[in-house]
Each structure stands twice: as structure tokens, then as C-alpha cells.
Amino acid sequence: MRYLMPTYVYTPEGLRSDLTVAIDEQGFIAAITPTVSHAASEGEVLPNMALLPGFVNVHSHVFQRALRGHTHRPLSRQDTFWTWRRAMYAEAQRLTPEILYEMALHTYREMLAAGYTTVGEFHYVHHQANGQPYRAPNAMAAALLAAAQDVGIRVVLLMAAYAQSGFAQPPSVEQKRFCDASVDAYLERVDALRTTGVAVGLAPHSVRAVPELWFRRIAEYSREHQLPLHVHADEQVSEIEQCLTAYGCRPIELLARFDALCHLTTVVHATHAEMNEISLLARGQSRVCVCPTTEGDLGDGIAPYADLLAAAIPLTIGSDSNTRLDPVEELRWAEYSARMRYQRRRVLVADETAAPGPLLLSYGTQQGAQALGLPTTGQIAVGMRADFVALDLTHAALRGWTAQDLLDVLFFGASAQVIVQTWVQGKRVWER
Ligand SMILES: [Zn+2]
């Protein structure tokens, strides 16, 4: 047993002082008890630190980290999501398992330093550049898993299915390495990972990239094995227009038609979701993952935060393109962009008398864990995995904090810079 004695701990009951967190051999929290003075010799004192649950990054495409800066200079006369995507495809073309491993190693380290203890890796570059599978069909997935293991971050591998470039259009040359020959071939690769104990999820890329038959089979598989299902939807207006032309309905409406909306589903972005789509998400008890820094960078738009909240749809966050890795900033921009959309303050709150901090933290931790099918992370409580970040309470950015407003001081006045330690399953995996 290992004992940690931070100055404060954020428990489901709020911020508490003078508590000792006992961690068992498997890295789970065995007890949280009042610190008694003689106990200090048995444990590790974390002076002037507050332990918060580790942040959960629900949506990452790790290799896109390589585009940071390089896609911020002009790519064409008028840059959009689609001109950015051309640059992203060029980067995807040069990946090999060795290059992907190196990129993931550095980027996952950067995630730990930012306070992310779990990452949902939405993995879609599966095959060789010409589209042929590697000799080991999951060679690219194996590279990601090896990097995560070597760095010490928990990864849930969201295996992307990709079949076409648009509604009933064959894949382009660059997309071939994302595609499996059939839905059976895709599910075989998922099965090979699942049955060897890898934490996996299903990720039909989007309604434009995956046809109906595939969607139905993948959703069935997700329900059969109770695995998370993640899908991009409503990020760009042109995707919605194409969907309306092909099916006469909007992307989230199409997901409902394909039986792909349930409590296992997380819709990534939902930037342009309309009221009927939001009602369908609520009825299915599905979640939404917003990626505010990426959505800002790519000019996607601002999600209908207030409507999602009113429909009681849980939100989660993702670093997506990994241009910026900072959960504090991601959550601040969720609230700030909501304020700009609705022209009022304090949008993401549990009720009208509440401050935003606690709800933002739950989006960044507990809700993210649920979206990745991990019921034992996201909170500091007995029986949960010991996944923490430690804040430096003496940091200049936090000066003036009180036990009542620490989370709001963090989310509105600080950044991941105030995080000085990151713990995954009882191990300190990063320290400033
Ligand atoms: Zn994405």
C-alpha cells in the first residue's frame, strides 16, 4: 500500500484538506481517510499541492501533431477545413509504424505533461501507403499501443472504419490506407485486438466515409460487446449538405436511422447540430465530444452548448488535431465560445446558482471516462484507479485561490502550467 498526503484532494464531495489517499498494489484507491499526524512518516507528503482526477482526452489523432505550425501558414488563397485536410493527408501518407511510434511517444508525453492520464486514440491510418495491409494487419495499432505503454498513458484504441470518400464515392488514393476491404475485414482486426485484452472502441469515421451496411454491423458489434462507438458528425456544413442530398436527412438523424445512437455512442463535434438531432442524442443517451481548440483552428464553428446542456447531454473534450495540448484551455474555450455564441456569461453550469468549475471538471474527467467505457477512472474515490494530476497551489497564476473557487481560478486564470505531477494507476509518470 502507498499513501499520498496532498494539501487538498478533489473528491466527489468537493475540495477537502487533510486527507490521505491509500493506493493498493494494482494502482486502485483503497481508502481515503483523515490524515493523522503520526502517519506522515508512512506516506508521501505532497506539500502545497491539490490532487485532481486526471484529465481524459476523448478524441486524438496523434500523428496530426506533426502539422502544428505547418498548417498555420497559407495553404491556398483561401484556407478552410478542406485545404487543411489536404495537408493532413500528405502527412498521413508518409507514416510507417516506426514513424508513428516516434510521433506517439513524444505526443503522449506532452499529453501527460498537460495532465491527460487517458487518451481515446481515434486511429485511422491502418494500412500501407498503397492500401495493402501490413503483414501484421494491426501493425500501426501496435505502434500506438507500444508508445502509450512506454510513456505510461492509458489508451483506448478507437479503431476507425473507413470505406469511401463521400456518399457512394470510392476512396481517393490518399484515403486507401484508411480503408479495409470489407466490414468483416475491419471487424476481424478489431476482434484480434479485443480478444487479446486491448481496450478498444468502434469508430465508424463519419456518415460520409462509412456506408449503411457497415454502420449497422459496427453498431451491432458495439452493442454485443458493450464497447464505445465514436463517430464524427456535423463538423462541417458541406457534410450536412451532402447528407441531405444523399439521404434527405442530417448526419445525426442518419445515425439514428442506422441504429447507431445509444448510451455507448459519442458524437464528435456536433458543431452544427440542430434541435431534432439534439433530441435524438438525448433519447439515445449519447454523449458529445467537443474539441474547442481544433474547432477554432479549423474554423468549424461553435457547438450549440446551451441546447446540449438543456437536453442533459453529457459533454467531453478532445485535443483532436493536437495543435494544442492543454485540458484547462480546452475547457475554458468550451465555456468562452459558448459565451460568445449566446452573448451571456456562465453557460456551462450545473444550475443557475452554480459556478462553471465543477461542471467543466466533470466534462474533462468523469464524463470523458464514461465515453471511453472506463467506469473506474475520472474521480478520486475508493475503488477508482489512482489517476491524478497535482496542482502547484503556490503557482502565481493561482494566487488568491480559496477552497470555494479553486476550479474557477484554474479554468479561467491558469493553464496546464500549474500541473506539476501526473499519476496513472498509482504511478507517478510525469513530474515538472
Ligand atoms: Zn477527429
Image: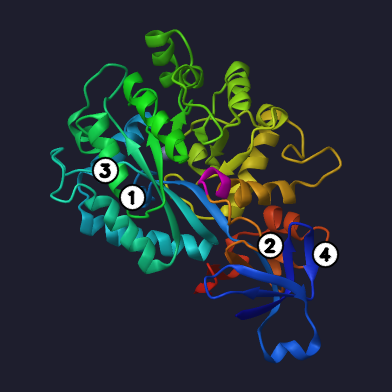
User: What residue do we see at 35% from left, 27% from top?
Assistant: 217
Is label 3 within 8 A of ligand 1 (CB to nearest ligand atom)?
no
Residue 402 got which mark?
4
User: What residue do we see at 70% from left, 36% from top?
Assistant: 339
Of the image marks 3 and 2, the number of the one nearer the N terminus: 3
Residue 195 got which mark?
1
Give the secondary structure at mark 3. helix
Residue extent of the magenta highlight? 369-373
Looking at numbered disc 4 in the image, what kind of residue is underneath it? Thr
Residue 152 lies in quadrant: bottom left
Whole-number angstrom distance, CA of label 3 to CA of label 2: 35 Å
- Crowding near the residue tagged with mark 1, few <14, some 14–19, many ≥20 C-alpha atoms within 10 Å: few
User: What residue do we see at 25% from left, 51% from top?
Assistant: 140
Give the secondary structure at mark 4. loop
Give the secondary structure at mark 2. loop
Of the image marks 1 and 3, the number of the one nearer the N terminus: 3
Of the image marks 1 and 2, the number of the one nearer the N terminus: 1
Judging by the rendered image, the residue that carries numbered circle 3 is 189
Q: Is residue 293 visible?
A: yes
Is label 4 within 8 A of ligand 1 (CB to nearest ligand atom)?
no
- Residue 147: x, y in percent? 33, 62
- Residue 28: x, y in percent? 58, 67
**Front in this rendered view, residue 259 or 331:** 259
Whole-number angstrom distance, CA of label 1 to CA of label 3: 10 Å
